[in-house]
Amino acid sequence: MTNTLLAKTANDVRRGIITAVYNAKSGHPGGSLSAADMMTYLYFEEMNIDPKNPKMEGRDRFVLSKGHVAPALYSVLANRGFFPVKDLETLRHVGSYLQGHPDMKHIPGVDMSSGSLGQGFSAAVGMALAGKLDNKDYRVYCMAGDGEIQEGQIWEAAMFAGSRKLDNLVLIIDNNGLQIDGNIEDVCSPYPIDEKLKAFNFEVANIDGHNFDEIRAALDKAKNTKGKPFAIVMTTHKGRGVSFMTDEAGWHGKAPNDEEYKKAMDELEKEGQALCQK
């Protein structure tokens, strides 16, 4: 896909995120929007997957360790064809299969249930190790939040992955700089993230998480890295794509009201139209 088509698809994903959270009257739009570009690239360009066969044995795996940004995962899965886009409107509703955190038992395309911060990466490391032990060539991608990496379990898993040289594993840190309590530096600074990961025997790339050329280059480098797990530290903007949500910690975990929903969707619609003209 061209960068323009990727950007248009990411815009569709963002519209799905806002639609889902608005209809739920709760959820986490900020971090979902910051992750949308990377997740779009993974599902539409990078990973070996088949929406018609979600449990395909040789598929690449994705674990959303920061499970509260499920709206991003659900929207990208829906837009990729795993289930109807219309179902995004049922997010968090009683009886819906699209609950507040990813559920591998009920949602096509979800490889691991997640939500308790720090635990998803451990599962991803286990998947990568299983691939090595079984001589499989699938790859495992895991996205964690920059606030989430304040959890000690992340670093236990990183130590294990580095010691086992799991070069089929890619950890992606969504470094949007904000968590529910504010700036991550003020809460409990994880910096320097890249140097910490290097100390755990990771190869690391620092990128702009909204630049598809940089995303492509980093993931290509990951595939060519041998003997080490790979980490991508991507600088992003929380709430990316919606002006009044951008870089605002307050949009970590709340839904837009009717007026805010209309404004957000109008902005995304205009952006989509502009991309169609390119």
Image (cartoon, grey):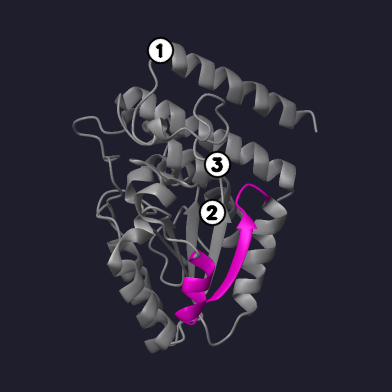
Q: Does residue 41 appear left or right of residue 116 in this picture?
A: right
Q: Which residues are magenta?
A: 193-211
In the picture of the structure, the residue carrying the numbered disc 2 is: 43
Secondary structure beneath dot 3 equals loop
Q: Position of residue 172 (x, y in %)?
A: 49, 61
- The three-letter amino acid code for the residue at tag 1 is Asp
Tell me where residue 157 sits by quadrant: bottom left
Furthest residue toward left:
94
Q: Does residue 189 appear left or right of residue 244 in this picture?
A: left
- The three-letter amino acid code for the residue at tag 3 is His
Q: Nearer the viewer, residue 88 or 193?
A: 193
The residue carrying pointer 2 sits among few (fewer than 14), some (14 to 19) or many (20 or more) residues within 10 Å by Cα, namely some
User: Residues at badges 3 and 1 in contact (C-beta under 8 Å)?
Assistant: no
Sequence order check, earlier mark of 2 and 3 = 2
Secondary structure beneath dot 1 equals helix
| 113 is higher (above) or lower (below) than 242 | below
Magenta segment includes 41: no
Name the residue located 49 percent from the left edge and 44 percent from the top edge: 76
Secondary structure beneath dot 2 equals helix
Residue 237: assigned label? 3
